[in-house]
Image (cartoon, rainbow, N blue to C red):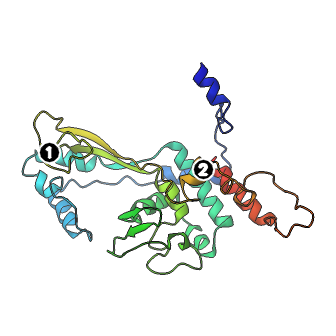
Amino acid sequence: MDLLRSFQNISWCKPDWCFPSMGKETNELLKQCTEIPRLELSDDIEEIIRKSNEFPIPFPVDTMRMKTLKERRPIDKLKKNVVSTYPLIHERVLLLITHFLTYKREFGTSIEKALYKEMTVPEFIDRLLKKRAVVFMGPRDKYKLLTGEEDKDGWEAIGTLQQKPPLVLENCLSYDELKISSMVYVSGHTACINDGTRHNKAKVKEDDIETEAVIIGVIGPRFKRKFRMEYEDALITKPQNTVANGYGNNNPPTPTGSKKKCPSPIVGEERRNWRKMWA
């Protein structure tokens, strides 16, 4: 009870979480998820191996690749693993995606508006999975793309008129898209080659272990890059929680004699809508 009382005293705690709002445009976007044709999934192991060998980035280890597993595990079980793999998305994330598309169609840059104009929710999810970087980490956004190109910095310009190749919205996820992509996971049955401890290094050690499991690729919160991704929503700081970022009074007064300009009504509305979307 004391713990509950403590939580209730926290400013961001919502004891009664409201049902999500769903307007006409939201309903129309969600209907697109019910109109997806059923796919015939292939369990051709040799085809999977061929595609794996054609992947443009070298795999760090081979012990969990299909070409290795087929020598030690029943083919039928490996086929089951292949067809069991699919994206895992919470229903409220689907709703968040509809709000995101609606927001970007109204407030996005010219590049974003062109991309999202006719995009469906399934197409957006497909984009989140296919346009991810191979590596994206650190306070300076060290990255490696599927093309093999590597560098750091410049990611915040994606989707703006300042974007430069190879970091362009056509080929890469923007920072705003990354926030949603961190909530889109991939799950499936998998073979186990060791006990899965943190520093197992993918070495085969099959004594006294579970031979099969269900795996979910979950992404943790990211705070190293200030004012981006989870930093925007989880941290409460003076530099972050400002009127310019959509917090505080809707129309703050400008102090007499102050040279500091308040955000324009358009910018204020844009940022408030962005903040409320993630609240």
User: Does the image show residue 142?
Assistant: yes
Instruction: Specify the quadrant of the image occupied by residue 189.
Output: top left
Q: Where is residue 134 in the image (x, y as percent from the top left)?
A: 35, 64
Left or right of residue 214, residue 162 in this image: right
Q: What residue is at 64 percent from the left and 41 percent from the top?
A: 20
Q: Residue furthest right?
A: 256
Neighbor class of circle 2 (other Cα within 10 Å; few <14, some 14-19, many 20+) is: some
Which residue type carries mark 2? Asp
Q: What element carries label 1?
A: helix
Q: Earlier in the sequence, mark 2 or mark 1?
A: 1
Q: Position of residue 19 (x, y in %)?
A: 64, 37
Residue that carries the numbered disc 2 in the rendered image: 233
Q: Residue furthest left?
A: 71
Q: Position of residue 253 (x, y in %)?
A: 88, 58
Q: Is mark 2 on a helix, strand or loop?
A: helix
How far, Cα to Cα, is label 2 from label 1?
Answer: 45 Å
Q: What residue is at 81 percent from the left and 52 percent from the top?
A: 249
Residue that carries the numbered disc 1 in the rendered image: 76
Which residue type carries mark 1? Asp
Relative to residue 204, is residue 9 depicted above or below? Answer: above
